[in-house]
Amino acid sequence: MSESEKPAIGVIGVGWVGLVTAGCFAELGHPVWAVDIDERKVAMLNAGGSLPIHEPGLPELVEANRERLHFTTEIGEVLEQARLLFCCVDTPPTYSGDADLSRVQAVVAQLPAGGEHALVMKSTVPSGTGRTIRRDKPDLTYVSCPEFLKEGTAVVDFMRPDRVVIGADPGSEDAADLVEAVYEPLGGQILRTDVASAEMIKLASNAFLATKISFINEIAVVCEEVGADVGEVARGMGLDERIAPGFLRAGLGWGGSCFGKDVSALKKLAANSGYHFQLITSVIEVNELQKRRVVGKLSKHLGNLVGKQIALLGFAFKPHTDDMRDASSLVLAARLLGEGARVRGYDPVAEHRARKLLPSVEFSDSAAEALDGADAAVLVTEWPEFAELDWGEMAVRMANPLIVDGRNFLDPERMRAAGYTYEGIGRASSGTR
Ligand code: UDX
């Protein structure tokens, strides 16, 4: 396919997934027509300059492909230009824990009858959603193509996918062929399957990754009891190709926009058909406890936390993003404030979002400022700049050089040599000088 022949791509919903999808398809040479109901966001994207989200590499991509990228609030323009419509609206959890499909339903309602367009579902939806949509709108061409992008590396993940899952039921195979053709240049393994299985692959993949993390976090607790080092244990486990090394980093647990939502949606999906998914229930519980255990690690050294000044290093749910959804810092800050501590913190990019969610926390302009006079620090997000701090100088700034390294990010020996009482997560000599 030469560049001039590349079909136009429609993107519905210009949130994080939509904007990455739009930018990357434009980079591949497709004209992209992207629609969002948020007028301010569309105006911001059309004006150029900073993007509504922080994602490494994306501003450069959007800027370089401005001519091919069209942002609008009118879905009619997108329908006129593109046959493939990638649905990227969000599906947040409802109070019941099920996925809220109202935005997906609103998109479907706007599509004209006649089957000229194909809806390509990127939004994460419970298994069975595609079937329900097609039952209600039988002439709709529908393809499931779940996204597996990670925040912070989304552009690279899009351009070099491990696999692309394309689910289509009878009657939608032609559209699935088109989707396969647009992904083909990226070289990932393409899996063609039915819609329900494609939907399930997404939920099961995220639930499995969350399970790996909760598993290693429980192993970390046992490591502390028996004097083993969870990093060494994970390394040894990961060498077995049946286990694989990824997602075995012990820490404060998983957060972000996907894991909590998808794990809960899978649990509810099972429950709705009468099945109690015990393993997933425990995975969620372990993740909850993981953040709370930090309070115990602090109290072990400080006793009562009333009036103690605690510095949080990092607010975002992981580095290289400003996303605060389900961030460990939210639970941690609330617990510390609940114990009567004073909480101050710093994050290189997430402060603007964190401020709205953490009104009782004091915000600093640098890690050094957050650590000034602190009785203890908790490393919450493994931002590279925290590894580069002059920890010797920081020890002098702190009232008491105690650190809980919630991501096992710092070198315990170096920290101890710099005068710290160091507590990691599941590290052999946690707590000893
Ligand atoms: C995840 C999935 O990886 C991705 O495929 C899906 O499309 C969206 O959800 P994301 O939420 O961006 O991506 O982040 P990810 O890198 O997967 O990390 C999720 C959370 O798990 C973070 O809070 C991270 O700190 C934590 N994590 C990850 C661990 O605690 N230990 C690990 O070993 C890996």
Image (cartoon, helix red, strand yellow):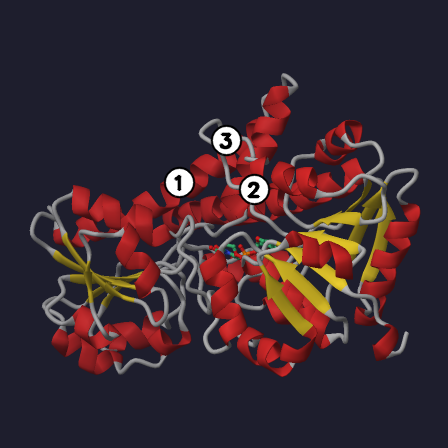
Q: Name the residue under label 2.
A: 91
How busy is the neighbourhood of tag 2: few (under 14 within 10 Å), some, or many (20 plus)?
A: many
Q: How far apart are marks 1 and 3 (CA)?
A: 16 Å
For the point 57% across and 35% down, the residue is 102
User: Vertically, is 176 above or below 417?
Assistant: above
Disc 1 or 3, which lies upstream in sequence? 3
Do the residues under discs 3 and 2 have CB atoms within 8 angstroms?
A: no
Vertical order, 422 against 263 (above or below): below
Is label 1 in a helix, a strand or a loop? helix
Q: Would the CB of label 2 be found within 8 Å of ligand 1?
A: no
Q: Mark 1 vs ligand 1: CB under 8 Å?
A: no
Q: Whole-percent x and y of residue 1?
A: 90, 74
Label drawn at residue 97: 3
Question: What amino acid type is highlighted by mark number 1?
Answer: Glu
Q: Is residue 411 above or below residue 357?
A: below
Residue 76 is situated, as x and y percent measured from the top left of the image, at 69, 53
- The residue labelled by disc 1 is 288
In the image as oriented, which residue stretches furthest toward the top?
274
Tell me which amino acid carries mark 2: Thr
Q: From the top left corner, tell me how far across and down residue 281 is, in percent.
A: 51, 31
In terms of image quadrants, where is residue 421? bottom left
Label 3 element class: loop
The answer to whether one can see residue 215 in this image is: no
